[in-house]
Image: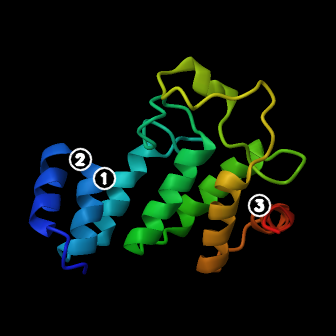
Amino acid sequence: MNPHVDLGAAADFIWRNARVLERQVFAALFLGGDMMRALEALRPYQNKDGGFGNGLEPDIRGPVSQPVPTEFAFRTLDQVGAIEETMIGRACDYLQTITTDEGGVPWVLPSVRDYPRAPWWETSDNPPASLNPTAAVAGLLQKWKIEHPWRDPATAFCWPKNR
């Protein structure tokens, strides 16, 4: 732990301002809390299509699934070490449905326009695949050794873009 970090002040900020999800992640990471509570706090953000939305990414307030909130969910699972294969598999199924012919997923989908969002969340009608979030999601699947039909083509999409 960085000796210059005031954990008490951070905790106070979290308890006063954070969503239940961030409170549970904080508890799991710094207070010996149960990682399963963080996992359960993440579940309501997952939609029936397997993707994540519902304001999980705070700058995208809409309920519909989007690629970056799905990445956010994967990063949250990784942070707390709660690798829940059913949740992850459903999310990968969703990613397959939005993957472009290039092999990756767009940064944001046009459905973002229908809901409140930060001004930088704009896209064209036919957004191209993007390294962000494709690389992060594919990389976490590789790290976790989770096989899914989406993973390897998405990984292949990323390699030429990293050179």
Quick one: label 1, few (<14), some, or many (20+) residues within 10 Å? many
Residue at which label 1 appears:
21
Residue depicted at x 70% and y 50%? 95
Q: Which quadrant would residue 3 be assigned to in this image?
A: bottom left
Q: Tell me if label 1 and label 2 are in contact, CB under 8 Å.
A: yes
Q: Is residue 125 depicted above or below 89 in this figure?
A: above
Image side of residue 14 versus residue 78, left or right? left
Q: CA distance from mark 3 to mark 1?
A: 27 Å
Determine whether the residue tagged by mark 2 lies in a helix, strand or loop: loop
First in sequence, mark 3 or 1: give its number.
1
Q: Given the image, on which type of amino acid does mark 2 rest?
A: Ala
Q: Mark 3 vs mark 2: which is more N-terminal?
A: 2
Q: Circle 2 is placed at which residue position?
A: 18
Per the model, the C-alpha gap separating discs 3 and 2 is 33 Å
**Which residue type carries mark 3?**
Trp
Residue lying farthest to the front in this orientation: 4
Question: Could you tell me the amino acid type at mark 1?
Answer: Leu
